[in-house]
Every structure is written in structure tokens, then in C-alpha cells.
Amino acid sequence: MLFAVVHDGFAGPEFLDLLRTRDEGAMHRLVNAYLPQILRAARGAGLNPQNAEDVCQSTFVTFIEKIGDFEGRSHVRTWLFGILYRKISEMRRSASRESGAESIDQVMETRFKTDGHWQKPPQGTDSATYESEVREHLADCMEGISTDQRMAFVLREVEELDSEEICRTMDISRSNLGVLLYRGRNLLRECLENRNIRSY
Amino acid sequence: MLKCKDLTRMIASDETEDFGFMKRMEIRFHLFMCKHCREYSGQIRSIGQGAKKMAAEAEPDREQLRRLEKDICGKMCGSDHGPG
């Protein structure tokens, strides 16, 4: 990935030393390099513009406060995303309820016969129509999935991080990540299908 | 023989990225033969692409980024917890 190559210098010991001494130039470079990604992920996780800005600010402040704990073993970006993820999780835990994640597993069960073949296949449409339906309803459907499912989905699809980095960011196993992606994507697909059923 | 139910699980959970050549071929063959799985797989892909487009359209403008960057740098410099 080009981005990772370009910013690899940020993981170097010299740059980390500059940050530890609160070097202003280094802090500017860090914020300049990663703010767009962190802000986009915060918005993608479902925060409104003001909350997203606030959480970005506190992510960078926490980063610099805890820089002494950072040993440079993971990428600076992974560490930043990890801080962001924990802050969003805390906000969500106090602000809203999580949806029943297991119910989507039951919905998926009903879609297949006992021999593993489709019983209730996806509603078919041409790809251009489907894309316009996604455009119309995806934002609303995203509101219906849990913070963890949403974060995993956004880090994968929007930020295009590999599985290993997402697992380190969210501190979960590869199979946990698989379950989050599976449930999140199927919840979104089911939601879109329910909304568009009238048009078939 | 790969079942549709297993295939949807592999696709939606990104298990396929860890697969070797033979397993990938098996999946491609199944998708070639099975209209419903092809439909499902295409929809999962469109949802991901849709999320990416949505994020691109909500990108903050340069002015907003510059202002926020200034705020953050101010706060970071102001945080005087000392190194380590």
C-alpha cells in the first residue's frame, strides 16, 4: 500500500524520540499525516461532525500523553486507530443500546435449506440498480449495526486495512473479526433488501 | 462439494483471503455455476464500495482540516504531562 510506504518514516525511532520531547514540528507532521484518516474513520463509525472532531482531538491528545508507553512495535497509525476505537466504544456504551447481534445468524439460517443450498435467495437485480439502492439507503442501514461491527466494516472497506492491522487496532482475534464482518455485512444486506423489496 | 451456505460465510467474513490456489478455484467455480451466490457476492461487494463512496463524499474540506489541525496541535503542545 502506497500510504504505508510513504509514512513508514513515522515509525522510525528518531521520529518517536522527537514526539517524546514534544517537538512541535514532529507533532504537526503527525497530525497532518493522519488527521484525514482518523476523522474519516470517526465519521464512518457514525459520529456526527461535531462529535467526530471532538473525538479526533482527544485521540491525538491521548496519543501524545501516552507516547511513553508506545514501544514502536506496531505502526503509529494502528496505535492511533486503536485509541480512536476505544474512545468511540466508550461513548457508545454510555450513549446507546447495542442491537441483538445474534438475530442476524437466525435470519441467515432461514435463508438456507438443511442441505446448505439457498431456500430464500437474494433478491436479484442488475448491479447499476443495486448500486443506486445502496446509495439511497446505506447510511440509514448503518445505524442498525453495532459499533464493533461498524468499526470493523469501515476499517476494512473504507480504510482498506488488512486483517492483522484491524485485529491489533480492535484487540480481537481473526475469528472475532470474521464474525463481526459477517454479521455487519449481512445486517446491511438484509436491511437494504427489506427496504427495496417493493421495487422488485 | 462447496455448499452455498458455507460460501456466503466465507465471503462475508473475508475468510477467502487466507485461501490457497485450489480453494480459490473451487470458489470461483461455484460462483460461475451458482446464480444466487453470484448475486449475493456482488451485493456484498457493492455494499463495501458504497461505503467507500459515501465516505469520500463526506470528506472534510481543506479549510476545516487546517482549522482542526491547528486546534489539535495547540492542545497537544498544551498537554504538559511530560514525556514517558
Image (spheres, rainbow, N blue to C red):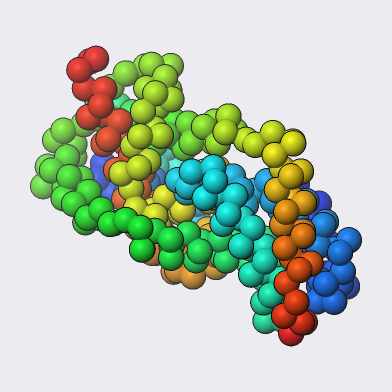
At a point 30% along the width and 30% down the height, the residue shown is A192
In this view, A91 is above or below A19: above
Q: Is residue A44 visible?
A: no
**Closer to the camera in the image, A93 or A17:** A93
Q: Position of residue A177 (x, y in %)?
A: 42, 60
Residue A18: image quadrant is bottom right
Residue B18 appears left or right of A180: right
Residue B48 visible to an observer of this rendering: yes
Relative to A58, is A128 above or below? above
Q: State the residue lying farthest toward the left.
A: A114
Residue at screen point 37% across, 41% down: A142
Quadrant for the C terminus of chain B in the image: bottom right
Q: Is residue A126 above or below residue B3?
A: above
**Residue A200, x across and y down, in percent:** 22, 15
Left/right of residue A137 with respect to residue B68 in the rendered view: left
Asked whether B46 or B14 is in front, the reply is B46
Q: Is residue A185 above or below residue A198?
A: below
Q: Quadrant of residue A124?
A: top left
- Could you tell me residue A106's position as x and y percent? 16, 50
Q: Name the residue rendered at 33%, 37% in the picture.
A: A141
